[in-house]
Image: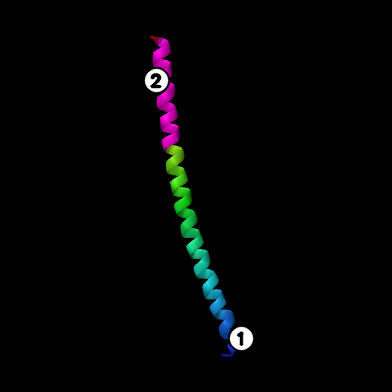
């Protein structure tokens, strides 16, 4: 294999690793965001229920 062919192959492998690492990070970011949104929604729901219970008394 020529030097140029080897360089192209190494670059392809490097970019694939980069892409995999990026997707893994993205997956974690999305998971964290989802958890944050879920807890925010739960907290908002609890706050609304508490406010509604206080108003109805």
Residue farthest to the bottom?
2
In the picture of the structure, the residue carrying the numbered disc 2 is 50
Q: Which coloring applies here? A: rainbow
Residue farthest to the top?
57
Quarter of the view holding residue 43: top left
Q: Which of marks 1 and 2 is nearer the N terminus?
A: 1
- Badge 1 marks a residue whose secondary structure is helix
Residue occupying the point 50% across, 59% down: 23
> Is 2 on the left-hand or right-hand side of 46?
right
In the picture of the structure, the residue carrying the numbered disc 1 is 4
Give the numbered dot on residue 49: none
Residue occupying the point 39% across, 20% down: 50
Where is residue 42? Give x, y as percent.
41, 32
Residue occupying the point 43% across, 27% down: 45
For the C terminus, give its image quadrant.
Answer: top left
41 inside magenta stretch: yes
Which residues lie in the magenta part? 39-56
Where is residue 49? Give x, y as percent.
41, 21
Mark 1, other Cα within 10 Å: few <14 / some 14–19 / many ≥20? few
In the displayed structure, would residue 30 be above or below residue 5?
A: above
In the displayed structure, would residue 33 be above or below residue 48?
A: below
47 inside magenta stretch: yes
Residue occupying the point 55% across, 80% down: 9
Quarter of the view holding residue 35: top left
Does the magenta stretch mainly form a helix, a strand or a loop?
Answer: helix
């Amino acid at each position: 294999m020529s030097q140029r062919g080897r360089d192209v192959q190494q670059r392809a492998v490097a970019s694939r690793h980069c892409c995999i690492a990026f997707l893994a990070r993205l997956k974690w970011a999305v998971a964290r965001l989802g958890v944050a949104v879920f807890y925010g929604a739960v907290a908002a729901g609890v706050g609304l229920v508490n406010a509604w219970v206080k108003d109805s008394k």
